[in-house]
Image: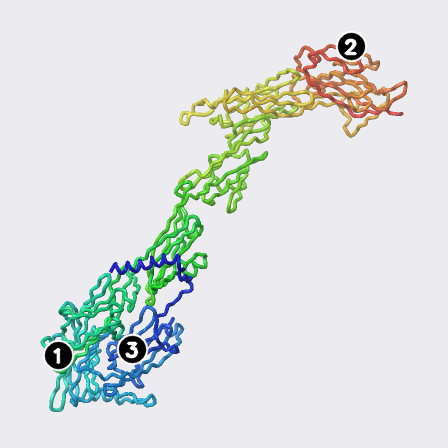
Amino acid sequence: MMTWLLGIWISWLILLVASAQKPFDVVPASQKLNVAASQSFNQRSGLKTECLGSFFKLSVDKSLAFGSRLEFDAINGTQIEALTPRLADKCGFSVASDPWGNTNVYASLLNCFAGNMDDAVFDIDMRVRVLGAKGEQDVFEVEKTCNYDKWAPREILCNRNYMEVSVNRLPGDITALHRPPKLGRSQMFDDQWTNTVSEAITSRYNIWRIMFFTPQQKAMLLVDALNSGYSITTTKSRLVLRSAYDMPETYVENVNGVPMKIIRVTTYFKKQWSVTMLDTVAACPTGGLVYTDEMITWNFPRINPLMDSTDTKILGMFMGIDGKQIDTAYMAARGYSLTMEDALIVMKLPMGGPDGYYKSHAVNNQYHIRYNIEAMLELLWSDGGTDTTKYKVIFPIKTPLVSGLPQLVDNTDSQLKMFDVLLGPFLYDVDFVNITFSTGVLTVAEATARGVIIEEHRFPNGSKTIRLQVPFSDLFVIKSQVDLIMTVYTLPLIFGFMILPEYTPFSYSTSVEVTLHDVVLPTITGKCDKEKFYIQILFGSAGKGFSVLLGKHDLTPERKAEYEVKENGTHMSLAVPFLASDVAFELMYPSSLKARLDVLVQEPVNKWNLGDFSLSCNFPMTMTECYSNGSMSALAVKVESVTQLSPRQLTLRDPSCKPKFSNDRFAYFTFNANSCGTSRTFYDGVMMYQNEISLDNAPVYQQPKTGEPITLPDADYHVTVSCFYTLNDTQTIAFFTKPRESEPLPETGFGVLDVILRLALDGSYNAFYLEENYPVVQYLRSPLFFEVALLQSSDPQIELVLENCWATLRDDRNSTPRWDLIVDGCVNMADRYETVLHPVASGQVQFPTHVKRFEMQMFAFVQQNVILKDQMFVHCDAVLCDINQIDGICKRPCPYSSPLKTSKVRRDIASDRLQRMQLSSGKIMLSSS
C-alpha cells in the first residue's frame, strides 16, 4: 500500500521539478476551478441513459446538480414514489455519486416499477428533481425502453445494495403478476394492476406461502414477506426474488475463504388440486479482497453455493468496469487480468488505475486517502443438462484508508523576509477553506484581502498543493529575541480543509521558524543647552519594545510627563533639566556646573542591555553671591565623588550656622559678612570675606540601631567661600577645598558694591537732590553740600575714604579745565575758598565710617576774566579701607606735605594697592541772577 502512496508523492515532486520549465496552473484560492470528468451526455439536460444487459443506468452530470441537491422518483403509471434507500433496496435500484458530483442510478429491468412486455421489452420511467438552496425545484422526466430477451433459466444480480435472483417457472402454473407494458403516454393506468396483485396474493391458484432457510427453516406468508421488505413477484415466465444485504433472513457463509451473503427461499404455488414448489437462491460476495502496494486482487470461489459441484461447468467468464463488460484488449491496456486458479476465480486490478479514483477521507482529524473502483464479474455456468445460470456481480472496491499526511516544503526566503510554504499534495476533492493564524481564524477570502498570498497549484494527475506567503512584518508572525542581535520569527499555522461532497472537515497544523541576525539596536544621541539635556532614542528593529532607565530610575509615566517625552513610530525624545533628580553632578567650574545624564535601554523580559549613553555638559550656575549690603549666599552641591554626603548636615565655621534650605543634593546658606565666623582680609587693593562649609562639626550618618554617629572616609567635605570687593565692583572667589581626585573646581560669583556721590539740599544732609532735579541752579559762592556714602554694607570695620575730588566744566571727568577740591585725602590748600570736610556723627547714620561729607562754594570757570560757561560737574575717587589699617591713604594726616597740583597727583605705594570707585555729580549751573 505504501508503494503506491509513495508513487503519488514522487509524481508530485516530479511535477514540482518540472514546474521550473513549465509553469504551474496557478489559480487564486478565491476562484476555484472544478474539473469535469469526461462524459458523454445530453448537453441540454445533462442526463444520459444506457441499457446494460439486465439493468438500466441513468447518469446525471455534475453540471446539472452544481450547488443543488438531487432526488429521484420512480414512476408507476400515475403513481410516483420517492426513491428512498429502503425502497431502492426492495425494488432493485441503486444510487451512487462520485467525488466530482456525477451521480449514477442503476435499475434492474425487473424492478418493481418497470413496464414489462413478454419479459423482452422493458419501459423505465423516472423523474429527476434538482432542489435549489432556496427551495426552487427543476424537474426532469426520464423515459427509456430497454430490450433484453436473452434470459438464462436462472439469473443472479449482485448489486451494491441488494441481491436479485430470477428463475424460469413452468408455463401455465400460475397467473403472472406484472405490470403491462406502456401503450402510450396518453393512456394512463387505473388501479387494475394493484387490484390484480391483491387478488393474486389471496388466490389459491398462486403463491401460497414462502419458506426461508436461514439456514434454519422459517415459514412466512407472502404478505408478511412483502411487508418485511422483500420483493417477490412473478412475470410472464419468471419468478423474481429480491433482498437487501441486511435482511434478517440472510446469512453469511465462508466459501474458500471468501465471505458470501446468501438468501435461500422455497416458494409454494397452490392450485386447486395441487401445490408446486420453486427454489430460489442468491449468493453474493462481500469480501475476498487482497491488497498490495501495486495490486488489488479479488478472489471469487470457483465453486459456490449456487453450483452443483458434481457436474458444474463454467461456460463463460467476463470482466467489467462500472457495469460495462470490457474485452481482452482493454484489459491488457489497463493491466487487468481474470483467471481461474485452483478453487478461485482471480481478478487483478492495478492499484491507482485510471478506471478508478482516489477519494479523500478524514479520520480523527487526520487526512487519509483510498482508491475506489467498481469492478464487475460475469459468469455463465451449467449444472448439467441444459440449465444454465447467468451470474453478475457489481462489486465496488474501496481500498483500506492510508494516511495521506501532507508534506510541508519550506521555501522561506530570509533575504526577502518572506515566509513561503508549500503544503500538499491533496486530492481534487479537498477544498481549502480557512487558516488559523496567531491572531485568529480567517477564511481564504479574508486572508487574501488582508494581503496574504494564497495560491492553489494544480497538477495534471489531478492533485494540488497550497502555497502560502506571509511577510515577516505581518502581525500574524510572532517575533522573539533570543539575544541582543538575533530574532526568531515564528509563523504558527492551522490549515482548515473540507472534503467534498461530504463536507468533512480536517486540519493540518504546523509552525515555520526562521532565526535571523537582523536586530538593529536602539541608537541614543543627545545634546545640551543652558538648561536641559535633550535625548533622542531611535527605536531600531525592535520598535518600542524596550524600557528606559535614566540614571538609576525607570522612565515611568510620571517621569515621561515631567521630561516632555514625545514619540512616534521611529523614535522618542525627552528633555531633562540639569537639576533633575536623575542627573548626576560631576564637577563645579567657574560659573557652571558639570552634570551628567546616564541613559540605559533594556530589553524588559531578559534585562539585556540594548544600548547605553552618557552625556556630560557644563550648565551656567551661580554657586556664591556677594551682596553690597555685606550679606553672602553659598550653594553646596553633592557631587559623585562624595557619595555618602548628607547636605543637610553641612555647616559654616560656626556650627550653629546651618543651611537655610537643604535636600539630598543641595545645601543653601545665607549669612552676613560679619557673622558665622566669617573672616575679612585686605590685600592688593581687594577686601575679601571668607568662610568655610564643611562636615567637621557634624556627623554624616548615624548607626541604624544605636544612633551613634559614624564618619565615612569619602564624606570629607570642605568648601571655602570667599567674596572680594573693589571700589567699583564686587568679586567672589569660592570653593577652595582640600585636594581630591574628583573635587569641584573654584567658582566665581559677581555682585555690586554701591557707593554714591549726591548733593544735599542744605547742611543738615537730611534731603538730597534726585536725578530728576538736575541740573541744579545755584548762585555764585552759594554753599554746595556733597555726601559720598557706601550703601547697604553692614560691616563696621570698613571705612570710606575720599582720595580726590575735583570739578570740571564738562561731564567728562578727565576733561579740562579742572579744579581740585580734595587731593590725596586732604582739602586743596591752594583754593582761597577752601573745601570744608564735615564730620559724621554716629547718631546721624548707622555706620559713620561709611559716609564722608564736604562743603564747597559755587564758582565758575573763567579765562581772561571771561566766564567760559555757567556750569560745572564734581567728581570724586573713593577707596574702602580697613578701619585698623595704619598706613597710606587710609590713615593719612592733613594737611599733607606733598606738593599739591590742580591736576592728578602722584600717589604713594600703599594707595596704589587699593581699587578706587569713581564718582561724579550731575550738572550744577550758575544762576544768572
Residue marked by disc 1: 383
Q: Is residue 239 left or right of residue 868?
A: left
296 or 567: which is nearer to us? 296
Label 1 and label 3: CA atoms lie apart by 31 Å
Q: Residues within 10 Å of mark 3 (few under 14, many from 20)?
A: many
* Outermost right residue: 865
Image coords of residue 698 (percent x, y): 49, 22
User: What's the colour scheme?
Assistant: rainbow
Residue closest to the eye, 167 or 444: 167
Q: Give residue 57's mark.
A: 3
Badge 2: how crowded within 10 Å, few (<14), some, or many (20+)?
few
**Residue mark closest to the camera, 2 vs 3:** 3
**Residue 100 sits above or below residue 758 on the image:** below
| Residue at the spot of label 2 | 899
2 or 3: tag closer to the N-terminus: 3
Could one spot residue 273 in this view of the protein?
yes
